[in-house]
Amino acid sequence: MLMTSSISSSSLRTSPSSLLPCLNQTTFSYSNSTISSHFMSTPTTRKHLAPLSKLRISSSENNRTAVDVASPPPTTSNVDGDDGGGAVVVRRFYDGINGRDLASVEELIADDCVYEDLIFPRPFLGRKATLDFFKKFSDSISSDLQFVIDDISAEDSSAVGVTWHLEWKGKPFPFSKGCSFYKLEVVNGKRQITYGRDIVEPAFKPGETALAAIGAVTWLLQQFPQLADRL
């Protein structure tokens, strides 16, 4: 981007410190808007602009100074050739499940993916087993039942947490709240899910009875440590 200020070319022949008074009130033109910056004369109270990658000052023929400032490099989640951040991939994953479009889901899952749904006794190992699980899910449940994302983390593209619930024709479905966690890696230029875990709200909620049961089990383990080998 190009910024212009009314600093005369004669001022450029002086020492750099002599330019500071000229910058006390400088109006910079950027695109269609004008930004006025006011610099204080003392270093302790001077207002600073955002860090810039380079600054070039040169005098032009009409005795005005062109200040060419390179914009800071943009921040993007599209790194290492992947096609989006982790949250983008996970949203596409849920969109594919909701649309019963397993072809679009397939490319989001790594070959060696490990997927755990904790209502099942064992995890699903590999892309094929994971897709078979979601195919059975899609075939056994009406398309009117849809996942709705409540919240999703977007700070880390390699680890994404999601809270969600199910809705039937736009209305919350009972006992359908859940949370999921995903690990992702860039594989052959695409960010894919390498691990997933689903935790679903139980239909039966024991409440404090669960705490009593856990307490009883830990008491037994303390009394009979050898039982821990059977866990």
Image (tube, rainbow, N blue to C red):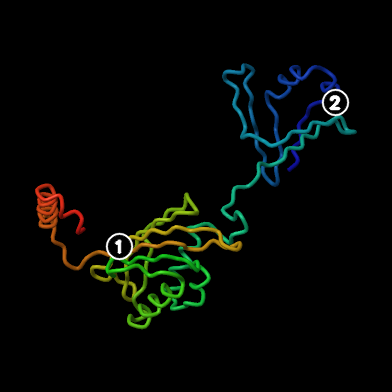
Tag of residue 133: none
Q: Residue at x 71, y 19 (%)?
A: 21
Front residue (pair 121, 231)? 231
Q: Relative to 135, say whether 45 is above or below.
A: above
Residue 37 quadrant:
top right
> Hey, which residue is sitting farthest right in the picture?
61
Residue 20 quadrant:
top right
Tag of residue 9: 2
| Relative image position of residue 51 (x, y in whole percent) | 63, 34
Q: Relative to 150, say whether 59 is above or below.
A: above
Front residue (pair 207, 143)? 207
Q: Position of 70 compared to 207: left or right?
A: right
In the rendered image, the quadrant that contains the C terminus is bottom left
> Hey, which residue is sitting farthest bottom in the picture?
139
Q: Mark 2: which secondary structure? A: helix
| Relative image position of residue 187 (x, y in whole percent) | 56, 62
| Relative image position of residue 18 (x, y in whole percent) | 76, 17
Q: How many marks?
A: 2
Q: Which residue is denoted by mark 1 in the rendering?
A: 199
1 or 2: tag closer to the N-terminus = 2
Q: Residue at x 83, y 25 (%)?
A: 8
Q: Position of 52 compared to 155: left or right?
A: right
Q: Residue at x 33, y 60 (%)?
A: 179
Disc 1 versus disc 2: distance between alpha carbons? Answer: 68 Å
Q: Relative to 84, say whether 16 is above or below.
A: above
Kind of residue indicated by mark 1: Ile
Kind of residue indicated by mark 2: Ser
